[in-house]
Amino acid sequence: MTSGNRIAIVGAGIAGLACAKVLIQKGFPVEIFDRAPDVGGVWSATRRYPGLRTQNSKNTYHFSDFPMPSDYPKVLDGEQMQAYLAAYADHFGLREHLRLNTEVVAADPVDSGWLLEVRDEGGIHRSSCDHLVIANGVFSEPNIPDYRGVELFRAAGGQLGHVSEFLDVEAVRGKSVVVVGYGKSACDIAEAVSDVAASTTVVARRLLWKMPRTMARVLDFERLMLTRFGEAHFHHLEPGRMDRYLDGPGSSFRISNLDLIQELATKRMNLRELGLLPEGRFEEIAESTVGLTTENFYEQVANGRIVVHRDTTITEMYGGREAPAVRLSNGQLLPADIVVCATGFQQRVPFLTPYVQRRLTDEHGNFRLHRQILPLDVPNLSFTGYNSSVLSTVNAEVNAHWIAALLAGHLKLPPHDVASEQIDARLRWMDERTRGHHAHGTAVVPFSIRNIDEMLADLKFRLPLRTRAAQWFRTVRPESYRGLHDRHKQRPEPTIPPGPVADPTPLDRHPAQTPGGSR
């Protein structure tokens, strides 16, 4: 192995850590950058909002070769999940490769790879690498709406911020809190503050279907979303045998199953009585994410501690000489000392030049990535964690092995035009299926297992038949994928190929791509 084959990974969350661990075991020199002082990404102490919990149980939300501590509860809180990831980094010797409190502020392609500008406590420095792995996550850049009147609102003492910036529940004691959004983070934080805030209001532009963790003895969230039979209830671009059956001769069976789940969920959460029954069918739960019910949220709505304004938005903020308040699109004026926006994230990579970003995305800002990993037109670059999934730990591990095989020259890729057509077809299908709610092409929900299968097929790795058969009706067990690590224990001589599906025109010839170019 030569000393020049250096890999830089931006992000020390689940995907970044898994990628680093696999690449290091393959013999690649790796450096991991993260602007936070700790590992964990969304689980970092710098981003953990009150009420944050894992969606999955610990039985399905861990790495294949690093089990959860036996004394951990079935559902982890944010602190426990971060501690697990920190232990993972320690166990596999990743600490010496980590550069925490270090932000990549610019990345420019050059002849030999990438020139990086990084900022740490000592200022801005330059670094370089032969291949850049972006693991900053699809939940890294908070999205806050641009409300009219926000200056007056803040001048009156009102506070506006993103849910990822809200860390202390005591900060809202005795205050009026308005939470914007109806996803899991919105409901999590509303429930967490509802017993200490003077009032807690949720402003929901659109009600989403949610699912309790358990609804019946043999039916729960993981059996629907983390089994092959559950996945087959949703329409895939390339349907398999069971998908075709459930969409054809067995369609009445599929519809009946989803109708049953919808009715059980409705009754469990008292949605009719609370006036919170969403429009549309239950299968819309699997657009770009999966809505899991926040424990005790609907109980707090029932007892008046949380008020939900459905099908409405904030149109204006008020302040000045008055107490801070917000006006809703239904005409109501609400007191609002604190407005917490659980309004999602922007899917972008801010440290890349505009020219590179344009080559990564289509005209709608959707990432054009083969297997949601490899850009077709930017050499020496790959992504990990851009396949947002309910099996994120296993997806990240398989993603890491895919990148390792790519860098070692062991991956057979389709021709550029074939891969381009496949990407465009996938984005069109995702747009139709989710009505545009697909996080700019970075989501695979509800097809987490299918996404893993596709990557494994590229790696020429197949699970034992008994394991695949069990996954039809039993939830996926991360341990089932340990064989991938065992198979690839040998360390081939790392080589950085020029990029088999990349555009043959070098990016560094473009005037905007010289070191220190536009950002």
Image: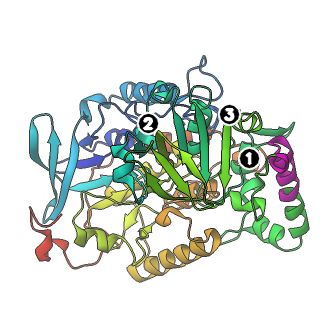
Give the crowd class for mark 2: few <14, some 14-19, many >=20 residues within 10 Å: some
Residue under label 1:
211
The numbered disc on residue 305 is 3
Task: Indicate the position of residue 499 as horizontal and vertical percent values.
Answer: 30, 68
Amino acid at the residue labelled 2: Phe
Q: Is residue 136 visible?
A: no
Q: Residue furthest top?
A: 71
| 89 displayed left or right of 123 | right
Residue 494 x %, y %: 27, 51
- Nearer to us in this view, 314 or 354: 314
Residues rendered magenta in the picture: 258-273
Image x and y of residue 264, in percent: 86, 47
**Reading the chain from its start, which is encountered first: label 3 or label 2?**
2
Does the magenta run of residues contain 269?
yes
In the rendered image, is residue 323 in sight?
yes
Hey, what amino acid is under mark 3?
Arg
Q: Residue at x 19, y 57 (%)?
A: 107
Q: Which residue lies under the disc numbered 2?
A: 166
Residue 237 lies, with reference to residue 233, above or below; the image says below
User: Of tags 3 and 1, which is closer to the observer?
Assistant: 3
Q: Residues within 10 Å of mark 3 (few under 14, many from 20)?
A: many
User: Looking at the rendering, which quadrant does residue 280 occupy?
Assistant: bottom right
Q: Is residue 217 magenta?
A: no
**Horizontal arrangement in the rendering, residue 509 relative to residue 136 (left or right):** left
Quarter where residue 502 is shown: bottom left
Secondary structure at badge 1 equals loop
Cβ atoms at labels 1 and 2 below 8 Å apart: no
Q: Amino acid at mark 1?
A: Met
Which residue is pictured at 29% across the width and 40% down the height? 34
Q: Which mark is residue 62?
A: none
